[in-house]
Image: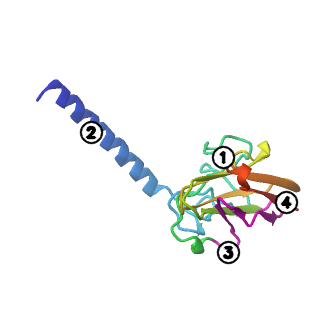
């Protein structure tokens, strides 16, 4: 064996160990692998990968703390978007379901109650990638990226009363009409 083969073999073993560790951790994670609408030790998970909703109606992190809506999407304190959802009809009935394509969002507006836990599912109904994002920085952590034909969801607590515009953050998409608003009462 050459020195190069030994290094490649050692690197492969390290990669296998890391992948095995990640698989084991994900399989033991009650939150990220729970079926839709399943109760976990932290709360109810609307879809695999989403942040749980506690018994008191607060969307919480994996450590049980309330999520923050004004942080970078995907960070541990932000609400987490789901894994791709294979059967959107299995989402809890109160889920707000929105489709997006080059024609825009449908529906382009929805209404929620201030402080309520909201589960929002976005489905790309065309062959493009889309990124749902609110314009207001107080909701910067609520972001959903979907690939062609894909559905993903996110749970968060609605902010104070008002209207909150959203758009597709892919360059050029909002300009062609991929915009809408959330009305909070």
Q: Are marks 2 and 4 in contact (CB under 8 Å)?
A: no
Q: CA distance from mark 4 to mark 1?
A: 20 Å
Residue at 43% across / 57% down in the picture? 27
Q: Earlier in the sequence, mark 1 or mark 3?
A: 1
Q: Are marks 4 and 3 in contact (CB under 8 Å)?
A: no
Q: Which residue is mark 1?
A: 78
Residue at 53% across / 71% down in the picture? 87
Q: Earlier in the sequence, mark 2 or mark 4?
A: 2
Picture layout, residue 121 above or below residue 62? below
Residue 93 lies, in percent from the top left, at 67, 75
Closest to the observer: 134 or 76? Answer: 134
Q: Which mark is residue 93?
A: 3
Q: Are marks 2 and 3 in contact (CB under 8 Å)?
A: no
Q: Is residue 133 something one can see in this rendering?
A: no
Residue at 76% across / 53% down in the picture? 166
Give the magenta part as a residue range.
Answer: 92-116
Q: Residues within 10 Å of mark 3 (few under 14, many from 20)?
A: few
Residue 112 lies, in percent from the top left, at 81, 64
Q: Secondary structure at mark 2?
A: helix
- Which quadrant of the view contains residue 161? bottom right
């Amino acid at each position: 064996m050459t020195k190069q083969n030994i290094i490649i073999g050692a690197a492969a073993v390290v990669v296998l160990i890391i992948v095995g560790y990640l698989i084991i951790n994900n399989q033991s994670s009650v939150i990220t692998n729970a079926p839709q609408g399943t109760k976990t030790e932290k709360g109810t998970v609307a879809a695999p990968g989403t942040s749980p909703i506690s018994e008191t109606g607060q969307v919480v992190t994996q450590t049980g703390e309330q999520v923050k809506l004004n942080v970078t999407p995907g960070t541990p304190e932000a609400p987490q978007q789901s894994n791709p959802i294979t059967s959107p009809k299995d989402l809890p009935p109160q889920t707000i379901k929105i489709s997006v394509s080059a024609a825009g969002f449908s529906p382009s507006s929805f209404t929620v109650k201030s402080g309520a836990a909201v589960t929002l599912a976005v489905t790309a109904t065309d062959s493009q990638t889309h990124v749902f994002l609110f314009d207001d920085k107080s909701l910067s952590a609520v972001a959903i990226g979907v690939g062609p034909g894909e559905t993903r969801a996110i749970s968060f607590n609605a902010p104070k009363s008002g209207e909150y515009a959203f758009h597709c953050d892919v360059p050029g998409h909002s300009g062609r009409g991929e915009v809408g608003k959330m009305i909070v009462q």
